[in-house]
Image (spheres, rainbow, N blue to C red):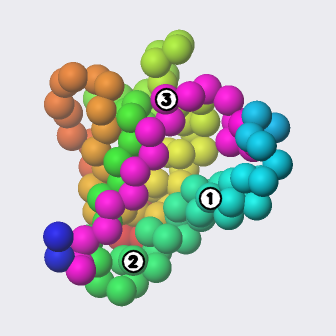
Amino acid sequence: MSERHVVISADTHCGAALHDYKPYLEKKYHEDFDEWAESVQAAERRIAEERAAGRVVVFLVHYPPFDRTGAPYRRPGHSLIDVDAVVDMLRRAGPDLVLHGHKHECWRVDLDAAAG
């Protein structure tokens, strides 16, 4: 893969809030978890940094963040729990491409992203 491409992947298949998983880990892993959680929460910053460096940014996510009309995709039990926050972040950060799984259909939504 070229140095000009960055892929950011977020499976989002689990339903709890990010930090709700920490108590289930052995204490020896808590520091690593905190570092990882910060990296997940820093997606918007990372997208901006990579775009500023001239790289193409592809954001991968399990559930679609948008429906066919460009509205947040909402389907009980089969959508992002924090879909509004993800949609807001994607509109602010403006990755070059957002790809999702789960829905085995194809549609295109163009974002009016603040980042261009």
Q: Amino acid at mark 3?
A: His
From the top left corner, tell me how far across and down residue 87 is, in percent: 50, 45
- Please tell me whether residue 53 is drawn above or below residue 25 in the rendered image: below
Q: Nearer the viewer's eye, disc 2 or disc 1?
A: 1
Q: Nearer the viewer, residue 73 or 45?
A: 45
Q: Amino acid at mark 1?
A: Trp
Q: Amino acid at mark 2?
A: Glu
The magenta region covers 3-22
Q: Residues within 10 Å of mark 3 (few under 14, many from 20)?
A: some
Residue with the mark numbered 2: 50
Which of the 4 image quadrants contains residue 85?
Answer: top right
Disc 3 from disc 2: Cα separation: 26 Å
From the top left corner, tell me how far across and down residue 78 is, in percent: 46, 18
Nearest to N terminus: mark 3 or mark 2: 3
- Please tell me whether residue 116 is drawn above or below residue 87 in the rendered image: below
Residue with the mark numbered 1: 36
Left or right? Give the position of 65 relative to 34.
left
Q: Any magenta on residue 96?
A: no
Q: Is residue 112 visible?
A: no
